[in-house]
Image (spheres, grey):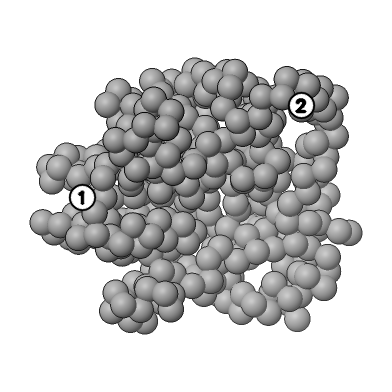
Amino acid sequence: MKVPLLDLKPQYLSLKRELDEAIIKVAESQQFILGNELAAMEEDFEKYLNCKHAYGVSSGTDALLLALMAIDIQPDDEVIVPTYSFFATAGVVARLFAKPVLVENDPITFNIDPKDFKAKITSKTKAVIPVHLFGQSAEMDEIMQIAQEHNIVVIEDAAQAIGTQYKDGRFVGTIGHIGCFSFFPSKNLGCYGDGGLITTNDDNLAEIIRIKRVHGGEPKYYHKVIGGNFRLDALQATVLRVKLPHLQAWSDKRKYNAKLYNKLFIEAGLAEDVGKTSLDEKNKVLLPKAVYEDIPNLNNYHIYNQYIIRVEKRDQLREYLSKNEIGTEIYYPVPFHLQECFSYLNYKKGDFPISEFSANTSLAIPIYPELTDEQIKYVVKTIKDFFEL
């Protein structure tokens, strides 16, 4: 049985007629940059996320970069980021010649540890970028309180968490000062290329973001500030407009798949329960835990952009799964403090043991909505077979 890590074709086929018509409509309009379709998409997301301002941008990475430019990050500034995340989280800080200050991750959620965040604050700290990794919210109450006490701007990296709710029901990306999303095709809500979104409830920040998204020109060709070409094109906007109404159903199916995985792994004797943090004879596979799952009326407590297990002999298991036609990926094999490009920060191996453990043991297995129960059972059976070799 073949089980790819991600198969986008079934989703496209289910929406083919509507998508094709929307794309053709944009082609016929000949309005490809900004324009009415993008404005309508932005309004759709403002309503969906319940935020005041949402701007489509060229990618999730550019959303983060634009957010830092909007708060005027300077080369002497420090920005606190988790050491375990996708490269863009720290890369955008370094691109502006500011200093990424790295912090440890929580051993259960993979998200930023608020205590380590607080410990790393200095007089030069201007911003923090909590990442809602793999589709689950970071501990935003504590992060926001710490940030407020130290006058720090909070930029939420919600690239993997479109539609995720915090424990109080608010959508991530609307809690901090600025929120950043990615619509890369592999995300829960993906467009047909690169694309992103930046959100804020602050009118002043919104105006700065709007202007800097188009090279800082206001009016056109008159520049008081320097921005960039961070525009989202109309073709991507129309694809997202078609897909957005289906996002909840796709998220629900991912949650169903995750619960089935948890059940089958436990029944197979590979794990005692979700949320364990130490590998041993009773827990050969560490399962992800949705920390807000039991809160009444909270639907999107975790949207499972990825379903991450942690195992010993991770690379050998991955090779075995590949031979059995099961797709996997490693998110992420090298934390920032061990990346060669950040050697100037003078971190060393052992500085962040939780993140290093995650980097050495984590493996993403298929979780996309179109997976069948039979495919999920095959994945678990194959992993059990590996441990019985």
| Image position of 197 with respect to 17: above or below | below
Residue at screen point 57% across, 76% down: 312
Q: Amino acid at mark 2?
A: Ala
Disc 2 on helix, strand or loop? helix
Is 33 or 336 nearer to us in this picture?
33
Q: Are marks 1 and 2 in contact (CB under 8 Å)?
A: no
Residue at screen point 27% across, 56% down: 79
Tell me the crowding category of disc 2: few under 14, some 14 to 19, or many 20 or more residues within 10 angstroms, Cα based: few
In which image quadrant can residue 319 be found?
A: bottom right
Residue 234 location, x and y as percent? 64, 29
Q: Taking the image as drawn, is residue 177 in sight? A: no
Residue 353 location, x and y as percent? 36, 74
Is 125 or 6 nearer to us in this picture?
125
> The N terminus lies in which quarter of the figure?
bottom right
CA separation in Å, label 1 and label 2: 43 Å
The residue to which callout 1 is attached is 126
Q: Which mark is residue 27?
A: 2
Horizontal side, residue 222 vs residue 312: left or right? left
Horizontal side, residue 119 vs residue 16: left or right? left
| Image position of 308 with respect to 218: above or below | below
Q: Amino acid at mark 1?
A: Lys
Sequence-wise, the earlier of marks 1 and 2 is 2
Is 94 or 145 nearer to us in this picture?
94
> The C terminus lies in which quarter of the figure?
bottom right
Horizontal side, residue 261 vs residue 355: left or right? right
Residue 174 location, x and y as percent? 38, 31
Disc 1 on helix, strand or loop? strand
| Image position of 235 with respect to 255: above or below | above
